[in-house]
Amino acid sequence: MVQDIILTTAYFPSIQYFSKILHAEYIYIEACENYSRQSYRNRCNILSCNGVLPLTIPIKKGASVKQIITDVRIDYSTNWQRIHLNAIISAYNKSPFYTYYSDEILKPINNNYDTLFELNKNILQVILELVHIKKEIQNTSSFIKKYDENVLDYRNSFNPKIRINSSAENIVNTYIQTFSDRFEFVPYLSILDLIFNVGPETKDYL
């Protein structure tokens, strides 16, 4: 039985994040939570020639555990956009489908969105369109600590602090990654890794 799900906002979310979206009827993005530091809300992991590389969006000072996620503003005092673009280009420009998707998928980074939530929302919409996933996605209108059994709550499921154990890794389907000649398969990366490497088969993989 397909159920409704709730997720947090995320920056170039993980492959597993999109898999949850694909298999749900209705999707809710938590818009009423307090900002949480050191999370995938403003961070993603890609695979570079040196291994897993985290990319983090700097947040303006003042963001705290008492600030609503939709109010969190991006700090443009550092040139993080160029750093992220250069890192993604370096990691994936030789991937099979980079040239087909890069212009559209990286466009949101070049736009100066005021808030993190706005940027992430735009990224989510772009990716869903590129991989042909049509779903109804809504923002929450109030914070609910615990949902009933009709809603699968994944707000705490995608966290860089949670270590993935080896038994979980064994059930992940693999695909050929850009640096497969250097590393064993690396799971749980940003959706960028999957799209640039498998292209139109992304939805089937999910």
Image (cartoon, rainbow, N blue to C red):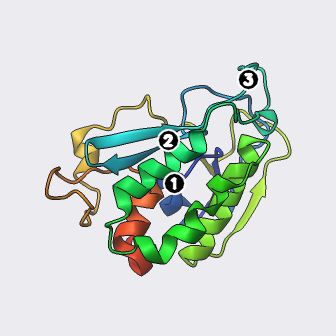
Whether residue 133 is visible here, answered yes or no, is no
Q: Is residue 42 above or below residue 129?
A: above
Q: Residue at x 70, y 50 (%)?
A: 119
Check the picture and name the quadrant holding the C terminus. bottom left
In the structure shown, which secondary structural element does the residue marked by tag 2 occupy? loop
Q: Residue 156 carries which label?
A: none
Q: Which image quarter: residue 173?
A: bottom left
Query: Dot 1 lies on which element?
Result: helix
Tell me if residue 21 can be seen: yes
Residue type at numbered disc 1: Tyr
Q: Position of residue 129 (x, y in %)?
A: 62, 74
Which comes before the other along the chain, label 3 or label 2? 3
CA gap between label 1 and label 2 equals 8 Å
Pointer 1 with pointer 2, Cβ within 8 A: yes
Q: Is mark 3 on a helix, strand or loop?
A: loop
What kind of residue is marked 3? Ala
Question: Residue 166: percent from the left, percent from the top?
Answer: 22, 41
Mark before the other along the chain sequence, 1 or 2: 1
- List the residue tagged with mark 3: 63
**Crowdedness of circle 2 by 10 Å Cα count: few (<14), some, many (20+)?**
some
Q: Distance between the residues labelled 3 and 2?
A: 21 Å
Please tell me how many numbered marks the rendered image carries. 3
Task: Tell me: 62 left or right of 80.
Answer: right
Q: Nearer the viewer, mark 3 or mark 2?
A: 3
Residue 126, given in percent of the width and then of the height, sits at 64, 67
The residue indicated by pointer 2 is 158
